[in-house]
Image (cartoon, helix red, strand yellow):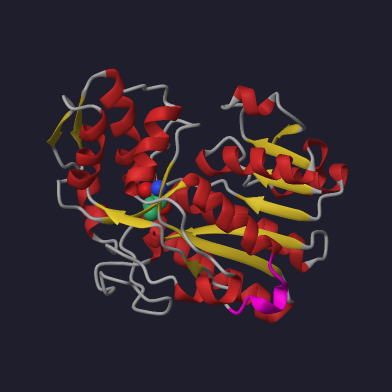
């Protein structure tokens, strides 16, 4: 049985629905600190669970006979800059609890999300390699890099089967954005439909690695279904979708909403975005477990506008 911690979040919500389609609703237990996605909480087994509370996690594992845990709870980059202590506590202690249960053989397999936020200002910006300079300058990025090091440590020293992906900025429509720097690329579609205009908190030429949520979910599941011995990287895999900047994104929206206008008013999140790469080299994921992205920017815009009920 599968437990998803942070199931009401941006990735967790979609992961829960997809895993339930594959394995059956009763075998996928969703959990979160509150029912912030009531529809999801009502769609199958749901537990209120604080990801920083080891006792609560342990009793949920015992109650449901959990074998696999997807730990999707985290505080994202922009919010983490406002609450560094809370971000470190949530992002790190939740991981230690789950890795310890795997070390103690209470569960068999762990998925833990990392991020391109583990790269920093000194990292090569284009086609950033799997192994390179890693000097993250954000609380979130520091917590994700530390988490990667611990995942690899638990694999090497205790044989824990933990798997991880460095997600780019993820674009989805099922949940509202949750404090990410890349979330401009979600807000823009909502505003384009509701207001016909968008004031972007990043400047026009801020190119970032991004990915449509359907690609990210497919990658996560194929990594978790891969044979353990085909997985050579136990820190976290680079994964690439499509790189673009707010100006390019706006142009694809204008093809569907000709009157759409964008203005730029960079805020504190510009500094975060400037510390991240513009594009990612994901060749290890391609060769080791057959990864290939499916959505380009045009397809993402079509998907987002149609799912947000815009008909041109
Ligand atoms: C964030 N969406 O903006 C997340 C992601 C690469 C960015 O980690 O914080």
- Residue 147: percent from the left, percent from the top? 53, 64
Q: Quadrant of the C terminus?
A: top left
Q: Nearer the viewer, residue 157 or 181?
A: 181
Q: Residue at x 68, y 56 (%)?
A: 97
Furthest-top residue in this view: 194
Residue stretch rendered in magenta on the structure = 226-232
Number of dots carrying numbers: 0
Q: Residue at x 81, y 42 (%)?
A: 27
Among the 4 quarters of the image, the one containing residue 308: top left
- Residue 229: percent from the left, percent from the top? 70, 79
Position of residue 254 relative to residue 98, above or below, is above
Q: Does the magenta portion include 227?
A: yes
Q: Nearer the viewer, residue 232 or 84?
A: 232
Q: Residue at x 16, y 24 (%)?
A: 259
Q: Nearer the viewer, residue 205 or 33?
A: 205
From the viewer's perspective, is 245 left or right of 33? left
Among the 4 quarters of the image, the one containing residue 123: bottom left
From the viewer's perspective, is 215 left or right of 127? right
Q: Nearer the viewer, residue 223 or 201?
A: 223
Q: Residue at x 38, y 43 (%)?
A: 300
Among the 4 quarters of the image, the one containing residue 83: top left
- Residue 238: percent from the left, percent from the top? 45, 68
Q: Does the magenta portion include 111?
A: no
- Residue 110: percent from the left, percent from the top? 68, 60
Task: State whether residue 169 appears in this view.
Answer: yes
From the viewer's perspective, is 266 left or right of 312? left
């Amino acid at each position: 049985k599968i437990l998803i911690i942070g199931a009401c979040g941006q990735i967790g919500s979609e992961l829960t629905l997809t895993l339930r389609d594959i394995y059956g609703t009763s075998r996928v237990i969703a959990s979160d600190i509150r029912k912030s996605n009531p529809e999801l909480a009502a769609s199958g087994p749901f537990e209120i669970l604080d990801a920083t509370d080891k006792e609560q996690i342990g009793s949920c594992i015992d109650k449901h006979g959990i074998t696999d845990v997807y730990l999707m709870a985290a505080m994202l980059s922009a919010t983490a800059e406002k609450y560094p202590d809370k971000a470190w506590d949530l992002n790190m202690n939740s991981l230690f609890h789950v890795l310890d249960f795997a070390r103690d053989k209470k569960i068999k397999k762990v998925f833990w999300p990392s991020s391109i936020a583990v790269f920093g200002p000194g990292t090569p910006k284009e086609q950033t390699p799997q192994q390179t300079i890693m000097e993250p300058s954000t609380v979130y990025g520091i917590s994700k890099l530390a988490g990667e090091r611990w995942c690899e440590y638990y694999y090497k020293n205790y044989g824990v089967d933990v798997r991880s992906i460095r997600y780019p900025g993820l674009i989805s429509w099922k949940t509202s954005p949750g404090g990410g720097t890349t979330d401009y690329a979600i807000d823009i579609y909502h505003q384009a439909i509701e207001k016909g205009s968008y004031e972007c908190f990043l400047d026009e030429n801020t190119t970032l690695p991004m990915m449509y949520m359907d690609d990210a979910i497919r990658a996560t599941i194929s990594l978790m279904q891969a044979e353990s011995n085909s997985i050579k990287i136990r820190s976290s895999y680079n994964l690439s979708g499509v790189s673009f900047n707010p100006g390019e994104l706006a142009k694809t929206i204008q093809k569907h909403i000709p009157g759409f206008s964008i203005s730029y008013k960079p805020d504190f999140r510009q500094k975060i975005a400037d510390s991240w790469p513009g594009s990612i080299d994901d060749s290890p994921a391609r060769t080791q477990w057959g990864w290939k992205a499916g959505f380009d920017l045009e397809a993402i815009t079509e998907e987002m506008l149609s799912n947000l009920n815009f008909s041109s």
